[in-house]
Amino acid sequence: MSVVDLLDRPVYGMAQVDRLLRLKSGTARRWIDGYWRNSQFYEPIVRLSPTGGALVTWGEFVEARLLSEYRDAGVRINKMRAVVAELRDHFGDYPLAKSAPFISAEGQEVVLRIQTDVDLDEDLQLVRLGSNGQLMLSAPVREFMDAVKYHDGRAAMLHPAADIPQVVIDPLRASGDPVVRAVPTEVIIDLTEAGDSPEWIAEMYDLELAQVEAAIRFEQRRRAA
C-alpha cells in the first residue's frame, strides 16, 4: 500500500479553509483553484493548474495560510503567482509549505533571485535585503514561521493564534480542526455554552485546566472576529 505524503493529504473543503483562515467567502477557491471574472480566467496561485476539486490538501492549506499574511498588504495577491510557480520548479510541489526556501541562506537566495526576476511588488516579497546587506525574511513570512512547525522539512502543524500555543491545527488530529491535544476547541466551547464548567471538561477529557481555558479563549476570539 502506497503512503500518501502529508502535504498531499486531503483535509478540508474550500469553505473550511475560508473559515479557519478568516478569509472572505470564496477567497480560498480563488487562491487555490483560480476563478473567472468578467469573462477572464485567473490561474490559481497554489495549484499548478485548476482541477475544480473541492477538497484541499494539507499542503494547499498551509500555502494559503502563508498567503493570508499578505491579505492586508494593499496589493493584489495574484501577483504572487509567478513567484510560486518558479519556487515550485526549484523546490517541488507545495514550496511555501516547506522549510527549504526560508530557513537557509541558500534557500533565501533562491527566493530573492526569483522575486527579482519576476519584479515582485515590495509589499509581497518573501525575502528582503537588510540595510547591512544580509538576507532576512519579510514580516509576513516571520509571522508565518512563528506559527508553523516542520517535520522532515514539511509543515506538520500550525498554531492558529501565536499567543495561545496550546491550540494547534494538525492534519492528523480531529480532521484538521483546531484542537487542544486531540480535543476540538469547538467541542469545548459548545460544552461551556451548555453550562459545563471548565473544571468538569478538563476532567472529562483528561486535559489540564489551562488547556481548556486556552480553547475557550481561542474560540471566543474567533467567534468575535
Image (cartoon, rainbow, N blue to C red):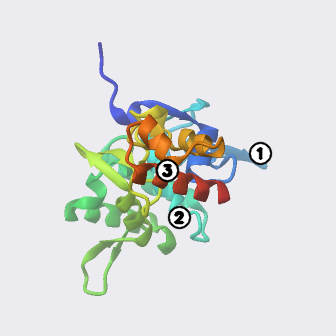
Q: Secondary structure at mark 2?
A: loop
Residue that mark 1 sits on: 39
Q: Amino acid at mark 3?
A: Ala
**Does dot 1 land on a helix, a strand or a loop?**
loop
Name the residue nearer the viewer: 54 or 225. 225
Residues under labels 2 and 1: Cα distance?
26 Å
Foreground disc of the pair 2, 3 = 3
Q: Nearer the viewer, residue 192 or 59?
A: 192
| Viewer can see residue 126 | no
Of label 1 and label 3, which has the lower sequence position?
Answer: 1
Q: Position of residue 16 (x, y in %)?
A: 60, 40
Q: Residue at x 42, y 39 (%)?
A: 203
Q: Residue at x 54, y 35 (%)?
A: 12
Q: Earlier in the sequence, mark 2 or mark 1?
A: 1
Report, in whole angstroms, how far the alpha carbon at label 1 lies from the one at label 3.
44 Å
* Kind of residue at disc 2: Tyr
> What residue is shown at x 36% (from left), y 45% (from top)?
157
Left or right of 222 in this view: 169: left
Task: Point out the residue furthest to the right here.
Answer: 38
